[in-house]
Each structure stands twice: as structure tokens, then as C-alpha cells.
Amino acid sequence: MVIIEVSLLSGFIMTSRSRMLLENRTIVKKIEVKANVVYIYLEKLNDESQTFILQLEQVIQVKNLKPASIKIYDYYQPGGLQISYYSWVGS
């Protein structure tokens, strides 16, 4: 099982529409939202490229937003952790 762990930017939440779209994908086994983190559980990954789009909604205005992390790892072998960061670009 592969887990994609998306830390949300401060002041943002994932939209319910985004959750619904993710849950309808056959590769997605389960989605959990805890505090400011979205966990996307996948049955497995293969060589085929996958794109996941999370729609976020800003609910609180926060100044000087820091980048948030996205971690991808195998549930049974978390030593192969991959980390990336994303930032909000807006007006």
C-alpha cells in the first residue's frame, strides 16, 4: 500500500468536491483528513504516471505562507520516503 501525505497550507482546507473526485479513482483505496493533513491511500503504484489534483479553499487569510510538504511512501517500507514541497501562488 502506498500513502500520499499532503500537508495543507495554513488557512486552507480541501474541498468536498476534490475529495469526491479522488474517491472515484479506482487506484484510491481510502482518504483520511486529520488536522491539516490529507492521507491518500493507494492499493499500489506501477510505472504508469499518475496525477492527483487537490482543490483547496482558503478559509483564513494567513500572511507569509510557508511551503507545505507532500510525502509519498510505502506503508510497509517507509524508508523509501519521497518528499516534495508546494506553495500557493495567488493574488
Image (cartoon, helix red, strand yellow):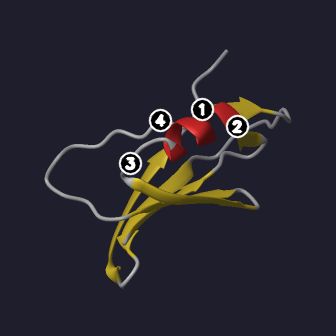
Q: Name the residue under label 1.
A: 55
User: Which residue is painted at 29% across and 64% down in the image?
Assistant: 44
- 10 Å crowding of disc 2: few (<14), some (14-19), many (20+): few
Q: Circle 3 — which element?
A: loop
Q: Mark 3 points at which residue?
A: 26
User: At which x and y percent is residue 41?
Assistant: 47, 63
Residue 15 visible to the viewer: no
Q: Name the residue under label 2.
A: 16
- Disc 2 versus disc 4: distance between alpha carbons? 13 Å
- 10 Å crowding of disc 1: few (<14), some (14-19), many (20+): some
Looking at the picture, tell me which residue is in the foreground, 65 or 82.
Answer: 82
Looking at the picture, tell me which residue is in the foreground, 84 or 77.
Answer: 77
- Disc 4 versus disc 1: distance between alpha carbons? 6 Å
- Disc 3 versus disc 2: distance between alpha carbons? 18 Å
| Dot 3 amino acid type | Thr
32 vs 87: above or below: below
Label 4 close to label 1 by CB (< 8 Å): yes
Q: Mark 4 points at which residue?
A: 53
Q: Circle 4 — which element?
A: loop
User: Which residue is painted at 79% across and 42% down in the image?
Assistant: 11
- Disc 4 versus disc 3: distance between alpha carbons? 15 Å
Task: Look at discs 1 and 3 and give the one toward the viewer.
Answer: 3
Splitting the image into 4 quarters, where does residue 75 fall? Answer: bottom left
Looking at the picture, tell me which residue is in the foreground, 63 or 72.
Answer: 72
Q: Circle 2 — which element?
A: helix
Task: Look at discs 2 and 4 and give the one toward the viewer.
Answer: 2
User: At which x and y percent is residue 27?
Assistant: 36, 52
